[in-house]
Image (spheres, rainbow, N blue to C red):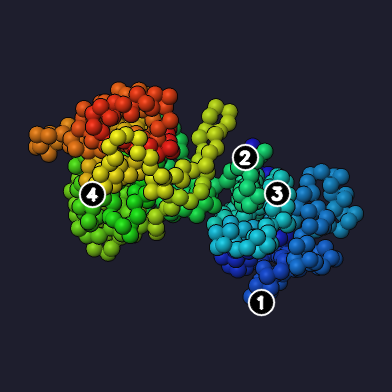
């Protein structure tokens, strides 16, 4: 790649975010750069005493239509797009008195902010930038000669280059800035397309655009030989993307994935009703419980599978308090994610220097719509978020015996958890706490047996003679295709079952439940998770 030094003699500045603009413009002026600007940007620079030329003076045409048309003019785009080494281009520049523009500094109207703030349709439409993307794309296309800057963080980059290269920039920098500019325009347009598609109610548009802003480059991906990065989308949802990391090491790819799984699960539990804790390992809950306090909920969740909880992720549905903080730091934990944390709790967690503490600012709404993506070779799958909640389901009693009030509560609890366990998923629960979880198995009966074994192991760890699953209820994320899975759960000690139903062998499964005096309810909703 040739370095191709290009000196900056004229700069066009038109920004909505004016952070750092004035000192940047002063530095450009100190290099003898002619400043050209529009509207509010021009007034701000002029009021600060800088000599700045209005775009209308350059084009000989005024801003019209409430500023919708101001830079869409051949004298602007010709100045940006003219190739300096092309004689025909330079002849056109001379013939039409077009002033070359060597630096374009533009950031876009805050469309995503308007949407996030709940602005009405017309107001959002007015925040769709037209001239800005046109100038950015023109400058990025002609990056052989022109530098483009789309955000304030790159002002020092330009100034450092000018200081090092006699007031100019080199091709490698301009190329990097161009790539960033094209990606920014694509993400901006993606946000507009997503908003308008949702407005018209189109679930599967003919073209789907995705965009995100880099949060950070990660040390590696799922494995050390894989590269990875974390991007934020315009979606307004509390979780890892909204969280502040108050302390601890940099989060890894796996940390972020597991933390998201834990926080989405704990959000199923209304903090106004109960304290709740979810412990996750490898994106699966290994312990979930409600409690009168966060500390109690944590201890009860931990009791489900204390072996797997080592080095896990802890998510709480209420602000972290001192009592819960003391309980959690007693066991090696990778991440704690909470809506907020008291000062005392922060100090306690601070005694474990490497433990990451995240405050998300709130809980995600499990009923809020959203989009889920999964990549495939040569494409990706898109689906709506699973917003079904067991509280809204009309549970149908399928057996002769109906569940008791306590069983019914635990059944709903267990199904709430099963929604967040990889399929095939079986969850045993008793007294508002999981007592055995079987995740990600190829057969449902194996998931039931593994979850029962977890209950036996946890009882042995606690010094109990009776497996934790005795007297429990059991939830299945999908229907039992055969009676064997239900029978395995009953043999483990389950007294009531919750499942979607819908198998061609439902009658066989119902008969097995009736023969064993077990209550069973159907939800009519499946919670596959892959």
- Reading the image, the residue beneath label 1 is 47
- For image coordinates 87% across by 50% down, the residue present is 92
Mark 1, secondary structure of its residue? helix
Residue at the front extreme of this rendering: 400
Q: In the image, is 376 to the left or to the right of 137? A: left
- Reading the image, the residue beneath label 2 is 204
In the image, which is nearer the foreground, mark 1 or mark 3?
Answer: 3
Looking at the image, can residue 393 be seen?
Answer: yes
Spatial CA distance of label 1 from label 3 is 29 Å
CB of mark 2 within 8 Å of CB of mark 1?
no
CB of mark 1 within 8 Å of CB of mark 4?
no
Spatial CA distance of label 4 from label 3 is 53 Å
- Reading the image, the residue beneath label 3 is 137
Residue 465, given in percent of the width and then of the height, sits at 9, 34
In the rendering, which numbered label is found on residue 298?
A: 4
In the image, which is nearer the foreground, mark 2 or mark 1?
Answer: 2
In the image, which is nearer the foreground, mark 4 or mark 2?
Answer: 2
Spatial CA distance of label 2 from label 3 is 28 Å
Residue 346 location, quadrant? bottom left
Q: Earlier in the sequence, mark 4 or mark 2?
A: 2
CB of mark 2 within 8 Å of CB of mark 3?
no
């Amino acid at each position: 790649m040739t370095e191709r030094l290009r000196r900056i003699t004229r700069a066009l500045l038109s920004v909505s975010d004016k952070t750092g603009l004035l000192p940047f413009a002063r530095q450009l002026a100190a290099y003898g750069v002619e400043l050209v600007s529009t509207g509010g940007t021009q007034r701000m620079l002029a009021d600060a005493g800088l000599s700045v030329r209005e775009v209308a003076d350059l084009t000989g045409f005024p801003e019209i239509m409430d500023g919708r048309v101001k830079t869409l003019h051949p004298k602007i785009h010709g100045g940006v797009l003219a190739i300096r080494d092309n004689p025909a281009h330079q002849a056109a520049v001379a013939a039409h008195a077009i002033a070359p523009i060597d630096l374009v500094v533009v950031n876009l109207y805050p469309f995503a902010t308007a949407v996030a703030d709940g602005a009405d349709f017309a107001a959002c439409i007015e925040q769709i930038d037209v001239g800005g993307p046109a100038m950015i794309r023109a400058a990025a296309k002609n990056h052989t000669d022109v530098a483009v800057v789309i955000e304030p963080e790159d002002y020092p980059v330009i100034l450092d280059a000018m200081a090092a290269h006699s007031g100019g920039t080199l091709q490698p920098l301009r190329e990097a800035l161009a790539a960033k500019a094209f990606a920014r325009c694509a993400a901006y347009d993606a946000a507009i397309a997503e908003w308008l598609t949702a407005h018209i109610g189109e679930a599967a548009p003919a073209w789907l655009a995705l965009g995100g802003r880099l949060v950070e480059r990660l040390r590696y991906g799922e494995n050390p030989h894989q590269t990875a990065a974390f991007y934020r989308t315009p979606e307004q949802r509390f979780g890892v993307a909204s969280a502040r990391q108050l302390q601890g090491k940099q989060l890894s790819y796996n940390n972020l994935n597991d933390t998201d799984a834990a926080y989405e699960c704990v959000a199923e539990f209304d903090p106004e009703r109960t304290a709740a804790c979810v412990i996750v390992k490898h994106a699966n809950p290994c312990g979930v419980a409600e409690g009168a306090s966060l500390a109690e909920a944590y201890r009860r969740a931990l009791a489900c599978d204390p072996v797997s909880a080592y080095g896990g992720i802890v998510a709480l549905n209420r602000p972290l308090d001192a009592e819960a903080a003391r309980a959690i730091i007693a066991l090696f934990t990778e991440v704690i994610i909470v809506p907020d944390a008291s000062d005392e709790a922060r100090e306690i967690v601070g005694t474990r220097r490497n433990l990451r503490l995240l405050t998300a600012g709130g809980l995600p709404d499990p009923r809020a719509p959203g989009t889920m993506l999964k990549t495939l070779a040569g494409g990706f799958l898109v689906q709506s978020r699973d917003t079904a909640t067991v509280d809204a389901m009309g549970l149908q009693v399928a057996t002769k015996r109906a569940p008791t009030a306590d069983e019914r509560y635990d059944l709903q609890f267990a199904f709430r958890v099963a929604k967040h366990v990889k399929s095939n998923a079986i969850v045993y629960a008793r007294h508002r706490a999981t007592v055995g979880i079987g995740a990600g198995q190829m057969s449902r009966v194996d998931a039931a047996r593994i979850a029962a074994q977890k209950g036996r192991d946890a009882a042995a760890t606690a010094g109990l003679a009776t497996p934790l699953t005795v007297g429990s209820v059991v939830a299945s994320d999908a229907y039992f295709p055969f009676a064997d899975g239900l029978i395995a759960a009953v043999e483990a000690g389950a007294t009531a079952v919750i499942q979607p139903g819908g198998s061609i062998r439902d009658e066989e499964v119902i008969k097995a439940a009736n023969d064993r005096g077990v209550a069973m309810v159907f939800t009519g909703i499946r919670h596959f998770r892959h």
